[in-house]
Image (cartoon, rainbow, N blue to C red):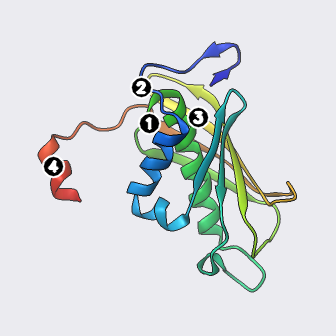
Amino acid sequence: MTRSGSDHRDDHSANVEAMNGHNAAIPFNAWLGAEVISATDEGVRLRVPWRVEFGGAPGMTHGGILAGIIDLSAYMALMAARGGAGPTIDMRVDYHRSMVNGAMFSLARLLRVGSTISTVEVIVQDAEERLIASGRCVFLSQGRKRPPEAIATET
């Protein structure tokens, strides 16, 4: 993925298949049912099918679900460019429209990929491309290093 004329892809970048494999292995992502449908210079697009558990107040998607989709989408953009990132350290979400009973589509675009922090913007739309929510996520650029035996005990 390129942004502002500079190439952010590195040797650790991931393709759509690898990103979907990652999502299948993460319980929350798998529960969401999120599918990366493309990773291009325009950004990373995801599709999230509707689940009855996404409902909040009548006629609305719960805001936490939309925030989760924004966070996941932003991480996928960094995974496409760099193979991943560290944890989310800041996130802003704006809710624009209510919706239920329909697939949601997100587009995540890199704003800045730095050696310490990275910033990604995300929009979430319905099938008719109406804006449902938007947000911005800031990540530590590198995850913490854990020995393999620590990772094995976490699963």
Q: Amino acid at mark 4?
A: Ala
Image point 44% across, 56% down: which residue? 24
Q: Which residue is mark 1?
A: 84
Instruction: Check if mark 3's residue and mark 1's residue have beta carbons within 8 Å.
Output: no
- Left or right of 15 in this view: 92: right
The x, y position of residue 31, in whole percent, is 49, 68
The x, y position of residue 7, in whole percent, is 60, 15
How far apart marks 4 and 1 lie (CA) works out to 19 Å
Reply above or below: 150 against 38.
below
Q: Which of marks 1 and 3 precedes in the sequence? A: 1
Can you tell which of label 4 and label 3 is closer to the viewer? 4
Q: Amino acid at mark 2?
A: His
Mark sitting on residue 6: none
How far apart marks 4 and 2 lie (CA) works out to 22 Å
Badge 2 element: loop
User: Residue lying farthest top?
Assistant: 5
Instruction: Check if mark 2's residue and mark 1's residue have beta carbons within 8 Å.
Output: yes
For label 4, count other residues whose C-alpha is less than 10 Å away and answer few (under 14), some (14-19) or many (20+): few
Reply above or below: 24 against 22.
below
Quadrant holding the C terminus: bottom left
Mark sitting on residue 12: 2
